Image (cartoon, coloured by chain):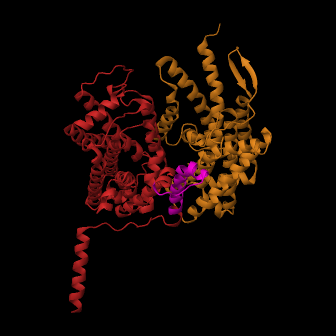
Chain colours: A orange, B red
Amino acid sequence: MVPTLAYTVFRAIIDGLLEGSLYALMGFGLTIVFRVTRVANFAHAEYVTYGAYAAYVAMVAWGLGLVPAAIVAALVVAGVALASDELVFKPLWRRGSTPLHFLVASIGVGLVLRFSLQAVAASVPGYLNIRLPEFPSTLAIIGGKVAINVVHALAPLLALGTTAALHVLFTRTKLGKAMRATASNPTLARISGINVIMVRRVTWIIGGLLAGLSGFIISYYIQANPEVGWNFLLWMFAAAIAGGFTFYGTIIAGIILGVVGQVAIILAGYYLGVTTAYKPAIALVIMVLVLLFRPEGIIRIQSLGLRRRA
Amino acid sequence: MVDALSLLMDPLFIDIMIIFGIYLILSLSFNIEYGFTGIPNLGKVLFYAVGAYVAGGLAGWIALRLAAFTPQQHLGGPLYCAYGAPQTITEVFKTNPAFALGVFLLSMVIGAAFGAVLGILASYPALRLREDFLAITLLAFSEIGRLITRTEEWPVCAHYGIRGLSTPFAWLGEYSLTVYMFLVLGIAALMYMLAEKLVNSPWGRALKAVRDDELAAEVYGKNPARVRAQAMAVGSAMAAVAGTLYAFYLGSVMPDDFMPIVTFLAIAMVMLGGTANNRGVVVGVAVLVLVDRLFNASVLERKFGIPLPDYLSNSIAYLKYVVIGLVIVLILMFGPQGLIPEKPLKTPIVEETKKKLKESVEGGEG
């Protein structure tokens, strides 16, 4: 007879993997944009929300299937991300703004995106709380208690697939190498003949694609509302910061953060009587501690073995 | 004459003026930290909340003591969370002028002290982190604070909030809000003068020195860590005073009144008016408070008789934040200095030297 707590913890791990994959996908977008353009982008949270809504509109209004809806979400958000760079961040960068200005500007962009969506959602009936019309089907029920559904498999697989694809991009393609060069030294990259404007665009598009996919998963798995992305904001920053704003570090830190967050709050509730309302505090506390005591991040996986090949 | 009187009793006018006063104090405090010292305090709303909760807790506790209140049903948390407590608190405010005024002054002083101490504590990361990470850390602080106030019964009544407060002039009946409006504006004016005095003092120059070049400031014998801590202490105490005024005006203190959006509003006000320029802040606050209060379907429809189509009346409350976001972005893109740019500080010695130079030039010619 397996005790109930074991099942609860097992469920927490499964849910944590799902959440962690989302933090990884979102945090990765944040990291890549931050490394290449120095924008600590608060609007990234809003991209996720837009992904959720784009998927919903694609399925409900246009009658598309699940997979096309996911693609639509990714593409729409890539467009939104690219537009916010072209309209706001690139002009600011041209006039030599500081990283702090970028951050404040991204708050402004986030407000515009979030509340214009709120305004639309408030005036169209049925858009304040959305969930994709197709519910994820159950794959397996373990021990008669813990149901694992499609999303539990989909999110980690997507995170893994993305990581693999990005690994190939960064190590095997000219474009990926150009992105890494720009990330580590923009001036030198420019002198070496890298088209930094092009690199910038690709960066925002990749960040947007990943945010769009995360948004799709969220509205597939739970309900989404115009604030859903904002609620994830500090989690994705926590993942990126714990990963020291390195590409692989962020992904690993995100997944760990998801699992640790879920398991810790369940254990704290079981043994200490802490309510689950404090779950966001875990991410916040981890983030603050990392920033104060190890600002370079806990998990840094910087090199990609390129040195050997050079 | 009649018109002026009716204006002074008009709820919308009073509301706008009081909110203007409160946000002016809040934005001035943000300006001291961000504009003059370069600390992007995205956790501003935390210190604002501290003032409000100190006011709520003190007023509630003392009022219930005075009324010898015993709850019929008490589910936990402090006495002022109990069922029936808010009505008793309001009653005491209405009948006991000495209490109302006394508790107002007391909570301003204690609130400011709490704010200052918390500000010094929060300045600790300001010594170690780069600006953008500092901003995120302070935002995280304010969100942790909000989580705690949402969840804990003790001492803040969780999501139920502390209710039943009133203006310190509740015993004046229908004139209470008008008198309170003058008080808030008076305090805001005092705070403006204080802020001007501070930033034009040697201490104010130290703030700017630390902002512009930390190393140089250190060479000239300023301790950047201490200067930042002082700026945070002053700014947070001011924010707490604003919070106290807000609590007595609104009559209740609820966790969800203290979302990061309040901080963002203060940022937009400071940036619109002019970073590191107190006069500019007054303009920025005036403009955005009008936006904040007039983007309201019931005000527009009932007060001014402007009919709104359905889709607008549902969404106008959100559109005001779109406007605020646009203000932030457009100011950064097209005029990062704001409406009234930063001016050199008024330094007595410089003024005198200029005068003497001018005199000597004129004397030379003659």
Whether residue A49 is visible: yes
- Residue A105 lies in the magenta-colored region: no
Vertical relation: B87 (above or below) B38: above
- The N terminus of chain A is located in which quarter? top right
Name the foreground residue: B97 vs A232.
B97
Name the foreground residue: B123 vs B11.
B11
Name the foreground residue: A236 vs B277.
B277
Q: Where in the figure is residue B178, as x and y percent of width and height?
A: 30, 51
For this view, does B224 lie left or right of residue A26? left
Picture quadrant of residue B337: bottom left
Name the foreground residue: B265 vs B61.
B61
Query: Start and end of the magenta stretch?
Result: B303-331
- Residue B312 lies in the magenta-colored region: yes
Q: Magenta region's main secondary structure?
A: helix
Farthest residue toward the bottom?
A: B366
Vertical relation: A69 (above or below) B148: below
Q: Where in the figure is residue B187, as x and y percent of width and height?
A: 27, 52
Q: Determine the residue positioned at 78% across, 38% down.
A: A66
Whether residue A166 is visible: no
